[in-house]
Amino acid sequence: GDWIMAFSKIAAENLGGSALPAISGASLTTLNASNISSGTLNTARYVDTGGKVLQIKSQHSTATLATASTGYTHHSGIDLSITPSSSSSKILIHFSSNGDNEAAGRQPEIGLWREIGGDGSTNTVIGGNSMSMFYGVGSRIVVPISYVYVDSPATTSVVRYRAVCKSNGGNQVLFGAYMGSNTSITLQEITHA
């Protein structure tokens, strides 16, 4: 069988000496934080390197855009601005909607325009291209559209974001709310500590 022996005390002299050496808490400099199960860790002992959300803006729309334009057309229901508190801040963009090619062989492209400081000449499709596109070879298709994008506008001026859509073939396509759904955009200003 197994031998089990309980110890309630171990005499210091059985550890090689008559007394245990004094230990100062100041000499505990490499304590692994995963071994701390309670108590308070002095803030000077850790570094907070995580980012912070400084502000959030959100907009929802039940509007639908119908367009046959081969150039980007603005969806009037999604037009949201945010003013970063620092030029080093990032803008985290969450976007969701729906698209409908209305017939076989049509291809909508969905994008997001960014304008800085109210200056229309700064309009650009962020990411340099569309954020989403789809094509129904032999049929009409309706698809959910969703993306997350981190933008670096490098400004403290107002930054305006607008959802846009175009039709690659010049045939009508739909973009936006469909069958009771919503189009939504959320902007979060993110900064490092």
Image (cartoon, rainbow, N blue to C red):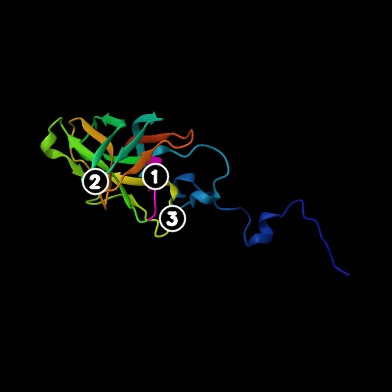
Determine whether 163 is above or below 17 in the image: above
Distance from Cα at disc 2 to Cα at disc 3: 30 Å
Query: Picture quarter containing residue 99?
Result: top left
What's the magenta region? 94-104
Helix, strand or loop at mark 1: strand
Residue found at x 39% / y 30%: 60
Percent coordinates x, y for residue 61 in the rendering: 39, 30
The amino acid at mark 3 is: Ser
Query: Tags 1 and 3 in contact by the CB under 8 Å rule?
Result: no
In the rendered image, which quarter contains the C terminus?
top left
Looking at the image, the residue that sits furthest to the right is 1
Q: Which residue is mark 3?
A: 139
Query: Tags 2 and 3 in contact by the CB under 8 Å rule?
Result: no
Which mark is drawn over residue 126? 2
Q: Residues within 10 Å of mark 2 (few under 14, many from 20)?
A: some
Which mark is drawn over residue 99? 1
Percent coordinates x, y for residue 121 in the rendering: 10, 38
Can residue 148 be seen in this snapshot?
yes
Is 137 part of what is drawn in magenta? no
Q: Earlier in the sequence, mark 2 or mark 3?
A: 2
Percent coordinates x, y for residue 150 in the rendering: 30, 45
Helix, strand or loop at mark 3: loop
The amino acid at mark 1 is: Gly
Distance from Cα at disc 2 to Cα at disc 1: 19 Å
- Closer to the observer: label 1 or label 3? 3
Residue found at x 80% / y 56%: 6
Distance from Cα at disc 1 to Cα at disc 3: 14 Å
Q: Earlier in the sequence, mark 1 or mark 3?
A: 1
Per the picture, the main secondary structure of the magenta-coloured stretch is strand
